[in-house]
Amino acid sequence: MASAGPGRGLIGRMVCGSDYRITSIDSSLAMALEYSADQLVGYRAIDLVDSADRLAMIATARAAAAGTEPMITVGCSFLRRTGGSLPVQLAISAFRSRHDDSRGLVCAVVATQSADGAAGTGADGRTATLLGAARIAAVARADLLRLLHTAASAANASSTIEEAVDAIVPSVCLHFGWQVGALVRWNGDAAGDVRPAHGCEAWPYDRPERPPSSGPRVRVQRGDQPLVVARVNDTAALVFAGAVDHAAIPVQALSAIAGDCARVADRHAALDRAQRTADNSRRRLTRRAADATATAQAPPQSTAQATAQTTAQATAQTTAQATAQTTARQRDVDNLTGLATRSQLVDELNRSLAARSNVAVLLVDLDDFKSVNDTHGHDTGDEVLVHVADRLRACVRPDDLVVRFGGDEFVVLCRVAEAAVTVAQRVVALLAPPIVTTSGPVTITASVGISDGSIPVAAAAELLTRADAAMYWAKRLGKNRYFVYDDNLHAQAARDKQTEILLRSAVDENRVVIRYQPILSTMGTGIVGVEAVARLVDDDGRIRLPGDFLPVAERTGLIAAMDAWVLAESCRRIAAVGNRLGRPLTVSVNVSAQLAARPDLGDTVAAALSAAGLPSSALMLELTEATLIQAGSVITDRLAALREQGVRVALDNFGAGYSPLAFLRRMPLSHVKVDRPCITRMLSDERDAAMLEAVTWLADQLGLTWIAEGVETDAQWDAVRRFGPGFAQGFLFAGPLAEDDLVRTLRTSPGGALWASGLGSRMSG
């Protein structure tokens, strides 16, 4: 992307929900920020604003949402993806849907010439005009999504297509301004049987012509009165008439609604087939009973035997059929949602691949679904899954397959690969409205990974694996979005596979090495401890950094075993270094969420300390904000037990997320490590400096020790030391060192008798 910003003037618009999350954004604005529009949908708009302008942005957005003025402007700077800022002026206006109580904000973004410049009055006028148009478009979009959701829900609740039409068509007519809506059926003849929807006017027009099966789903038939025909299937269509601008017919929306009606028709036809099959089975049993009665001509002594034998055979056959049907249903139908299961999906994929059909797989993973079970209970979680299944059925085409893949994961087998993105967009949109449960409304979002077969696959499992990889990237980009598996991701997947192969044998083949970064006292008493960090050695002998292999280790479940080994080895080696120098050392070790969740965490720590001969006070476990925030009470209790034994627990990367300061008091912590970006920005941003000062003061008040990460310049070191007694680490002092380099550094550093001093005891205690 070009680093230079756009010239002065309007560069785009975006629409946000009441939670400030972006629901749509112009591609021109996204490009100016060095993203694609799809990447930004779901992001909170305030997170794109420079931290110095964030409070002003929130205040303006709240004022706009209150509706006191039709348009409110504010100047701020947007953050580009690769760094730098884009000075802009925002014109913010609120909108509200006509059909429900949903609200949102529309923002017109005008580029300015400088951070404090403002767009001219001409730009203001043009912005106001375009903003008004954007508000209208946002309301229309919200209303259309509401209509599609209403149609899908009605289709799910209807048993016949007539019932669905009566529930759906009046809403469609009201939304688009048509006067009449009806269901038309053809039974082999050209003239259709017109049935006006319940609540609509009588049908005063000629019957429409039967649309060709190969033609478009929505078409306009001309006559005395133009008719809009939305084809449902070969024998039915929805027809609308009345005053309307036919040049702006909502083709996609009508196609989706017709598809909902097609699902009802297909479902009803399937029930009819099942009923006919059951009737035929009963007739066959009746005939067998009649045949058994006919054996009455046999000798009296054998009649009872023959009847019993015939009855036993019929009973055994009926039982076998019922058992086979039950087994097949359990194999192919999910008991909770009624969706297809993984086994049926694999069968369908294998058939499609064998027939060289161009299909796509959408892997739908509910975002943070664990919190639903934790907050509302598993019964409510099951309710949510059932509603999600219903909404997914409403998103797909009639011949697509919706599968419950397991837990909170679903898969859509899209029979036409080209329609996969459209289906994914509908999934994200239709899952957005709150789900009403017996415990109250629950809001859920989903991340969708798409594997469209554009990169050839050899087996069904490969298609699913690629969809899973794409889903993972959708989550990394902010969740509540979709991501398509492409060549770049394919190349990354190949690299990740090689990394996984390395990781599986890394410990046994000595491919994991440990480096130690010194931690210094701000009081000038030298090195007080080290942080142990893992490195991976590849086949070429190249040292790979954590960001290159830890995500793979986490996804493959290898991270817990690796962390446990690093913990034990770090304790052993630091004990050896301490013995060589004749003084004790402390070591900090990073702990992943997977290791923290293991029931044997306490035993693992105790074994590492015992084998190394280290006291509990010599070890500090570092956990990130995300790990601690997501930690349940069980993990918190385990950490508290370790704290009682003397092991230290540090909150790592504090300031990188959104945890409240009260979080410092609730968790069993001894140390707080301030995130590197806060240290980097504190000299140029007064807000970061003030936040760092507040954190160090609060830590001191709570009896915690603070550590500043990423100190890289003398100016940063001087600033950090002004906050009082604490600790720091960074490349200004030393990067992660090999063991021999660490020994040489410790021998030449001041503070050799530090551990007998008060600061040394504070670091270890």
Image (cartoon, rainbow, N blue to C red):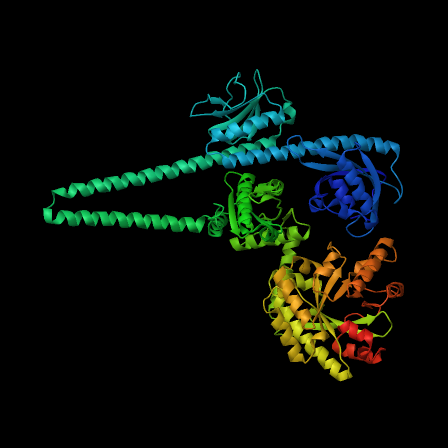
Q: Quadrant of residue 104?
A: top right
Pick whichever, 453 or 737, lies toward us: 737
- Please name the residue shown 34% across and 48% down the image: 322
Please give left or right for residue 574 compared with residue 243 in the image: right
- Which residue sits at x=25%, y=39%? 286
Residue 130 or 598: which is nearer the viewer?
Answer: 598
Above-or-below relation of 19 to 628: above
| Left or right: 495, with 359 as reference point | right
Q: Give coordinates of residue 580: x percent, y percent.
A: 75, 84
Name the spot of residue 579 as percent of width and height, x first: 74, 83
Q: Quadrant location of the C terminus?
A: bottom right
Q: Quadrant of residue 610?
A: bottom right
Query: Does residue 685 appear anywhere in the picture?
Result: no
Give the answer, above or below, for where 532 lies relative to 57: below
Q: Quadrant of residue 593?
A: bottom right
**Picture coordinates of residue 123 (x, y %)?**
85, 33
Q: Is residue 232 above or below residue 523?
A: above
Visible residue check, residue 344: yes
